[in-house]
């Protein structure tokens, strides 16, 4: 009798749908209980640098502790434009607000909630227009920063997805990436985007800006992993932006200029 009972589960497992079994095992894990690691660019005053965990001018995953140095190949699976706002920056009651989509959520401060970001004077679109028209000084830049967010994984690391966000002085790299993705003629994950860092200075304070170029071709297993991740993101409808400027720019008044003298954001 005991032999039969021991053998029966093994016989049943041969006919089990492994994918359905796995889905059932993790089916109760909610989106709110997930952390999507952000790969940041460490600046001189980044916490990981001041804590001695990594040098400045490196790509760094604060969740895994992985230090990628000053160059990495990133396979992009999804893109979303986001917004980032810090209320009472550097104060004890500092609070961070993040959003995706064209409208400020109801959870944002009253002066912004429910309004189109494109119409808010403190958001980048109007700030750029006003600065180029000479109405205001660029100064520390707009209060509400536009972020270009990319979800995917570092080439060779298909296990856990990550997010890279580009904003402010790294926004030109985002525009180049978007051009590559839009006109590449194939799926975005067919090849990686190569990201490097360019050292700049403002008032003798160094900071690092992301540069982007076409990267290496993706391996077959990376393409399959990207497709799976793309389906998961599609089923979720979106992906959460968990706060923080992914480039961790601490020199906020760095003002890149266009050839015509306007402000590029």
Image (cartoon, rainbow, N blue to C red):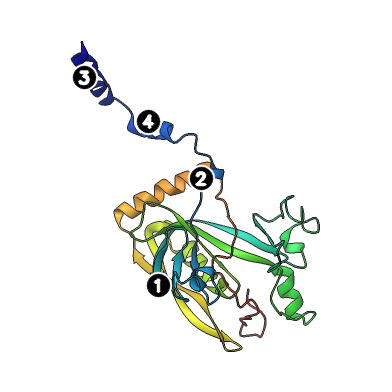
**Which element carries disc 1, helix, strand or loop?**
strand
Q: Which residue is mark 3?
A: 7
Between discs 2 and 4, the one toward the N terminus: 4
Residue 143 x %, y %:
71, 68
Q: Which residue is mark 1?
A: 71
Indicate which label's residue lies in the foreground, 3 or 4. Answer: 3
- Above or below, 242 against 29 in this view is below
**Which element carries disc 4, helix, strand or loop?**
helix
Between discs 3 and 4, the one toward the N terminus: 3
Alpha carbons under labels 3 and 1: distance apart:
53 Å
Indicate which label's residue lies in the foreground, 2 or 1. Answer: 1
State the residue at coordinates (37%, 30%): 21
Q: Which residue is mark 2?
A: 234
In this orientation, which residue lies closer to the viewer: 14 or 45? 45
- Badge 1, how many Cα within 10 Å: few under 14, some, many 20+? some
Alpha carbons under labels 2 and 1: distance apart:
29 Å
Residue 114 x %, y %:
77, 52
Indicate which label's residue lies in the foreground, 2 or 4. Answer: 4
Alpha carbons under labels 2 and 4: distance apart:
21 Å
Between discs 2 and 1, the one toward the N terminus: 1
Q: Is residue 191 left or right of residue 203?
A: left
State the residue at coordinates (61%, 85%): 259
Alpha carbons under labels 3 and 4: distance apart:
20 Å
Indicate which label's residue lies in the foreground, 3 or 1. Answer: 3
Between discs 2 and 3, the one toward the N terminus: 3
Residue 240 x %, y %:
57, 51
């Amino acid at each position: 009798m005991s032999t039969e009972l021991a053998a029966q589960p093994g016989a049943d497992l041969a006919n089990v749908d492994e994918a359905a079994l796995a889905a059932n095992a993790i089916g109760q894990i909610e989106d709110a209980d997930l952390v999507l690691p952000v790969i940041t660019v460490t600046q001189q005053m980044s916490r990981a640098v001041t804590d001695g965990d990594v040098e400045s001018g490196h790509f760094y995953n604060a969740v895994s502790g992985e230090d990628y140095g000053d160059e990495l190949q990133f396979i992009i699976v999804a893109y979303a434009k986001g917004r980032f706002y810090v209320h009472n920056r550097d104060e004890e009651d500092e609070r961070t607000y993040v959003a995706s989509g064209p409208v400020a959520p109801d959870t944002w401060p009253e002066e912004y909630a429910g309004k189109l970001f494109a119409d808010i004077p403190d958001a980048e679109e109007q700030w750029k227009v006003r600065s180029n028209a000479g109405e205001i000084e660029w100064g520390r830049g707009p209060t509400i920063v536009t972020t270009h967010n990319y979800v995917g994984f570092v080439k060779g690391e298909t296990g856990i997805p990550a997010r890279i966000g580009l904003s402010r002085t790294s926004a030109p790299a985002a525009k180049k990436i978007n051009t590559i993705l839009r006109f590449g003629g194939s799926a975005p994950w067919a090849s990686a985007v190569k990201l490097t860092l360019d050292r700049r200075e403002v008032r003798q304070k160094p900071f690092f800006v992301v540069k982007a170029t076409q990267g290496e071709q993706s391996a077959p297993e990376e393409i399959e992993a990207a497709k799976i991740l793309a389906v998961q993101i599609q089923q979720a409808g979106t992906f959460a932006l968990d706060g923080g400027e992914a480039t961790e720019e601490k020199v906020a008044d760095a003002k890149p200029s266009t050839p015509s003298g306007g402000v590029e954001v």
